[in-house]
Every structure is written in structure tokens, then in C-alpha cells.
């Protein structure tokens, strides 16, 4: 999980004669140039045992142990036995460190390419067709495994499209699994975004739930909790949710129902992609998508109108409840 800089940098300068590497360094953000090995260090440190690799590895160890908030230039320097100023001879800011950390943990094992098995429905050397569903399933699971191994990973903001080598290698792997599918370049990128976003979202939820269990807070599960929640989530107000609360399925944080939410959702997404791919192959028309609605203006009048709507909906729910109670009492009187 280290970021190799020196060998890549010298190799590029030999290949490109120096000029193009200089141009690339000037165009790319500093951390991106460092990750590709095309950025010169601001100043060589006097102690050669310090390197970008050691800085990033140490930062990752700190984040794994104590969270992303514990990562600071002074903490990294202290753990390495150097002064804080020594680090700035290799990186220019903490933002560079965070970006390089994010790329370093994406240096995951990537399955080798199988050219014969990825030309449409062509067979592999052993005669079996390429299973693109299995490939994309494994790709999505790799995304969630990175966050499981490094829970701080999604806390680093996404500042744009992937530009660093390990991130691009992972993306290339996902696109490779779709090589033989009748999808446009834009559709392949949308598919990759769909799967990676889903894995990221589920991993964040699972991480936060796990943290809440280890915190000093009342457990959000068990018979007592379910009974208390059922008092609030009534069939009158939540007609479809109330049965799940009563059965305990809603607060089943221990997974007693043996349902793997991530795997279930992933298979349904792959089902949808497979249906879309089949339509593309057969030439059948595909379901058009609607453009997303325009953002609601951030306006005081809009906020007040939305508040009035919520209050009206609350009064309507109460009125319907009173109506049902009145009907029930009337039926009781009629029965007597």
C-alpha cells in the first residue's frame, strides 16, 4: 500500500525527454503529479530514509487506528521521528497527504485480463463464456472491501473524476468487465458510477451502524426496543411500515433474518443491467429516462410554503384518525 514515486518519475523523464513531464506536472494538481511520479520534490530532505512512501504509509496507519481526524502533519512527523517541517520537503500540504492516502489504499489485487473471454460472447481458452455479471459483482465487492478495511476512506471528499493511477486502474478493471457488452462509452461510465456509488453508500451505512453499536448508546434492537417503537409507528400513520416494526424486521440490526442487504441490492442492480443489455443486443427500444427535476430554489417563501404543507398534512392525518375512530364507535353503537 505504498505510493511509488521515484522510479516512475525517472522513467517518464527518460522516455519523454523531460519537457512533456514538466508540462504534465504544471497542469496536474500537486497530489496527482506526485502519485504519477512526475512531480519534483520542493526540496530534498537531508535524511534520505524519509520518503513520500513512508509518509503515506504512516498516515494510513494513523487513520486505521484512530480515524481520519487524527491525521495531521505533526502526528505523522512525530510517529516517523522527524520534525513537521521535514515533511514539507516531500509534500506541500495535508491535502496532498489525504489524496495520496486515498489512492494508496486503492492498490488492490486486480484479476488478470482474459482477452479471448471478453470479445462479446466469445469463449475463453477453456471454452467457457465470459461472465460479465460475476466480474462486475466482484468489482463492486472490491469497492466495499476497501471501506471495510479503511473506514475513513469515504470521509475524504470527492473533488472530481479519478485522476490517480490506482483509482484509474480500478476503474479500468470495471470497464474491462463490460468490454464485450453493447453499451456506449457513456453507458459504461454510468454503470460503473451506479455500482461504485451503491457499494460506497452501503459500506458507509454499515460502518456507521457498527460504530453506533460500539458506542455507549441504548441498543436499537431487541424485544423491548421493538415494543417501544411499535407504540410510535402506528398503522394509522404508517400503514405499510408498522407491520415490519411489529415483526421486528425493521430494527433487525443483528441480521437475524439472514438477509444480506448489500448482496440482494447488488443482484437486483445487475438484473436491471442485464435486461438493458439484452434489449441493446436485440435492438428492442429501451426505456427512456426522465431528466432530473430542477433544484428547488433556496428561498424563504418556499421554505414557509413547505412548512405550511407539512403542517396541513399533519392535520389531515389527525382528521382521518378521528374519522376512523368515529366510524368505529358508530358501528359499536349500531351493533348494540
Image: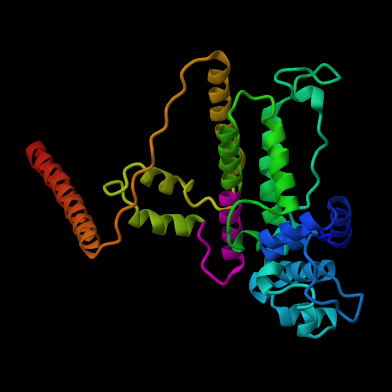
Tell which of 219 and 92 is nearer to you.
92
Instruction: Please state the horizontal and vertical placement of residue 106, each as a whole percent of the image.
Output: 74, 53
Which residue is found at the position 75% from the left and 25% from the top? 118
Check the image and report above or below for 34 versus 76.
above
Quarter holding residue 291 = top left
Q: Quadrant of the N terminus?
A: bottom right
Which residue is found at the position 79% from the left and 77% from the top? 89
Queried whether the magenta region covers residue 220, the answer comes back as yes
For the rendered model, the colour scheme is rainbow
Q: Quadrant of the C terminus?
A: top left
Check the image and report above or below for 21 versus 181.
below
For the question of whether residue 259 can be seen, the reply is no
> Quick check: 176 left or right of 10?
left
Check the image and report above or below for 120 versus 76.
above
Tell which of 179 and 25 is nearer to you.
25
> Quick check: 297 left or right of 57?
left
Instruction: Please state the horizontal and vertical placement of residue 248, each as a whole percent of the image.
Output: 47, 48
Instruction: Please state the horizontal and vertical placement of residue 158, each as a whole percent of the image.
Output: 58, 58
Which residue is found at the position 75% from the left and 70% from the top? 59
Check the image and report above or below for 179 versus 18.
above
Instruction: Please state the horizontal and vertical placement of residue 309, each as a whole percent of the image.
Output: 20, 55
Give the residues drawn in magenta, as a range: 200-221
Queried whether the magenta region covers residue 214, the answer comes back as yes
Which residue is found at the position 69% from the left and 43% from the top? 171
Q: Main secondary structure of the magenta part?
A: helix
Q: How many marks?
A: 0
> Quick check: 141 left or right of 185?
right
For the question of whether residue 291 can be seen, the reply is yes
Amino acid at each position: 500500500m505504498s505510493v511509488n514515486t521515484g522510479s516512475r518519475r525517472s522513467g517518464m523523464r527518460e522516455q519523454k525527454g523531460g519537457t512533456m513531464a514538466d508540462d504534465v506536472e504544471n497542469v496536474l494538481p500537486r497530489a496527482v503529479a506526485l502519485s504519477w511520479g512526475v512531480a519534483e520534490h520542493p526540496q530534498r530532505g537531508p535524511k534520505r530514509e524519509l520518503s513520500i512512501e513512508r509518509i503515506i504509509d504512516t498516515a494510513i496507519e494513523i487513520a486505521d487506528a484512530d480515524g481520519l481526524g487524527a491525521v495531521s502533519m505533526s502526528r505523522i512527523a512525530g510517529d516517523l521521528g522527524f520534525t513537521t517541517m521535514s515533511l514539507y520537503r516531500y509534500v506541500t500540504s495535508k491535502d496532498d497527504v489525504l489524496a495520496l492516502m486515498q489512492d494508496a489504499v486503492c492498490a488492490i489485487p486486480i484479476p488478470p485480463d482474459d482477452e479471448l473471454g471478453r470479445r462479446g460472447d466469445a469463449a475463453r481458452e477453456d471454452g467457457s463464456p465470459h461472465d460479465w455479471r460475476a466480474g462486475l459483482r466482484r468489482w463492486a465487492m472490491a469497492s466495499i472491501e476497501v471501506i471495510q478495511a479503511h473506514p475513513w476512506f469515504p470521509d475524504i471528499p470527492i473533488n472530481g473524476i479519478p485522476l490517480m493511477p490506482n483509482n484509474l486502474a480500478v476503474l479500468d478493471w470495471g470497464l474491462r468487465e463490460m468490454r464485450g457488452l453493447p453499451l456506449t462509452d457513456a453507458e459504461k461510465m454510468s454503470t460503473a458510477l451506479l455500482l461504485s456509488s451503491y457499494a460506497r453508500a452501503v459500506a458507509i451505512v454499515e460502518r456507521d451502524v457498527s460504530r453506533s453499536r460500539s458506542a455507549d448508546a441504548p441498543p436499537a434492537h431487541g424485544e423491548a426496543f421493538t415494543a417501544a417503537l411499535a407504540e410510535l409507528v402506528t398503522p394509522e400513520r404508517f400503514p405499510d411500515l408498522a407491520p415490519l416494526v411489529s415483526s421486528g424486521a425493521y430494527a433487525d440490526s443483528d441480521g437475524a433474518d439472514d438477509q444480506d442487504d448489500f448482496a440482494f441490492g447488488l443482484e437486483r442492480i445487475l438484473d436491471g443491467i442485464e435486461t438493458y443489455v439484452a434489449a441493446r443486443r436485440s435492438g428492442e427500444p429501451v426505456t427512456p429516462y426522465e431528466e432530473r427535476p430542477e433544484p428547488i430554489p433556496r428561498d424563504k417563501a418556499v421554505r414557509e410554503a413547505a412548512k405550511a404543507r407539512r403542517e396541513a398534512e399533519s392535520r389531515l392525518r389527525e382528521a382521518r384518525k378521528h374519522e376512523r375512530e368515529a366510524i368505529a364507535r358508530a358501528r359499536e353503537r349500531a351493533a348494540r
